[in-house]
Image (cartoon, grey):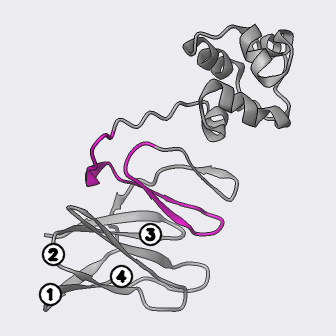
Amino acid sequence: MNQYVTGTMIRRLRESRNMTQHQLAEMISVSDKAVSKWETGRGYPDLSLVEPLAEALGVSIIELFSGEDVVNTNRSFNMQRMKLYVCPICGNLIQSTGEAVVSCCGIVLPALEAEPEDENHRLHFEKVEDEYYVTVPHDMSKTHYISYIMALKDDGWEIIKLYPEGNAEARFKICKTKCFCYFCNKHGLFRTSVR
């Protein structure tokens, strides 16, 4: 097992639950010497113990692997706190409304940070009746393309999935639209405000 299941994390979580090494060992059917070895970095839990260990420590398996507690302080929804994640393997787009540990295809995904537009990634939009007609003049080949265009609004978001060899265009209702985000499969997430 890789070193990302750290003894420091196991100890910190165990102590935060006011548990002794012996109590933790009993909960997952190992010896207290095994727990001591994990916490001092002289050994690692067997893969079959990861799930019961995470459960005993009150965290998810992903939190145990990442070495971080996820405490979501976002008690009321705020679009400014929304985070987006894109899986580089399958292309899934995942959205959270606050702090989260997100995993897809066996990897933990970092939250995307939207960058301002550049010369090669410039979105154009125009009002057509009650909608914005949005286009991105970008290569749409099988290996380099815009995969999503999103309209972020005060109370949610609207997303259009795009496909290689198609057109990078979409239509969104004007009502409450604050900005657009779009994802290039090679260069990441870009953002432009509605002026």
Mark 2 vs 3, N-terminal side = 2
Residue shown at 55% from the left, 31% from the top: 68
Q: Nearer the viewer, mark 1 or mark 3?
A: 1
Disc 3 to disc 4: CB gap under 8 Å: no
| Viewer-nearest residue: 12 or 57 | 57
Image disc number at residue 130: 1
How far apart marks 4 and 1 lie (CA) works out to: 20 Å
Q: Is residue 120 visible?
A: no
| Quadrant that contains the C terminus | bottom left
Q: Nearer the viewer, mark 3 or mark 4?
A: 3
Mark 3 vs 4, N-terminal side = 4
Residue bearing mark 4: 136
Vertical arrangement, residue 21 with respect to residue 118, above or below: above
Amino acid type indicated by mark 1: Asp
How far apart marks 3 and 4 lie (CA) works out to: 11 Å
Disc 1 to disc 3: CB gap under 8 Å: no
Residue bearing mark 3: 183
Vertical arrangement, residue 41 with respect to residue 180, above or below: above
| Quadrant that contains the N terminus | top right
| Viewer-nearest residue: 108 or 12 | 12
Q: Nearer the viewer, mark 4 or mark 2?
A: 2
Image disc number at residue 90: none
